[in-house]
Image (cartoon, rainbow, N blue to C red):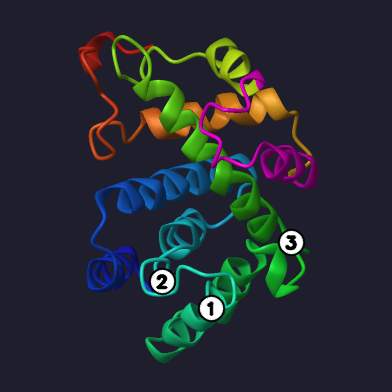
Amino acid sequence: MNREKAITILNQYITKQSLINHMLSVEAAMRFYAKYYNEDKEKWGICGLLHDFDYEIHPTLDRHPQDGANILRSVGVEEEIILAILSHADHTGVPRNNLMRKALYACDEITGLITACALVRPSKSIYDLEVKSVKKKWKDKAFAAGAKRQEVEKGAQELGIDLWEHVHNVIVAMRSIAPQIFLEGSIDPTDKK
């Protein structure tokens, strides 16, 4: 499985731009952590890219991601990636017993919160988003209420990294793809931090 084939799978099953942006964000974060841990960036990136590919067709816990796993098997996705995708959902019971699985879980929810924090900035950009801004919004439980803060904390803990260092790392990863996820806002990319 390569990235081109993974993108083909996404295009076949996903129509909502917000969901595509989420999966691209998780892919970027997974690539960041693959480099951080000296792991396979391509494999980890594909795992992030495909983790929610079936969410539009299986939007309920009784089907996502377990029914999607069968689709991925039918198109030749590696079992290691499929098991990582299954492990990002607590209800599947698939243990997060390796770094790729832990990283996927840690990167999933936090990307949504970071996106929301960037979009409420005057610049609507991730380039000037700092950890302290995320900390402020973190305390407001009504803000980006869909981003499950308990899962974000649990993910960082399982990955063995400080929560705010993790937030910083994911911001950096998402900055690297800001144009693709529509988070450049009004900031000139040549002036980005």
Q: Amino acid at mark 2?
A: Asp
Image location (x, y in percent) of residue 123: 29, 12
Q: Earlier in the sequence, mark 2 or mark 1?
A: 2
Would you say residue 61 sits in the magenta stretch?
no
Q: 78 above or below 132?
A: below
* Pointer 2 with pointer 1, Cβ within 8 A: yes
Would you say residue 152 sits in the magenta stretch?
yes
**How far apart are labels 2 and 1 at the CA level?**
9 Å
* Pointer 1 with pointer 3, Cβ within 8 A: no
**How far apart are labels 1 and 3 at the CA level?**
24 Å
Q: 75 above or below 116?
A: below
Q: Which numbered dot is residue 63?
A: 1
Q: Callout 2: few (<14), some (14-19), or many (20+) C-alpha neighbours within 10 Å? A: many
Q: Callout 1: few (<14), some (14-19), or many (20+) C-alpha neighbours within 10 Å? A: some
Secondary-structure class at tag 2: loop
Q: Which numbered dot is residue 54?
A: 2
Disc nearest the viewer among 2 and 1: 1
- Pick the quarter of the image with the C terminus: top left
**Where is residue 162, by image quadrant?**
top right
Q: Earlier in the sequence, mark 2 or mark 3?
A: 2
Q: Which residue is pictured at 57% across the width and 67% down the height?
A: 85
* Residue that lies at the very extreme toward the front in this rendered image: 142
Pointer 3 residue: 98
Q: Amino acid at mark 3?
A: Asn
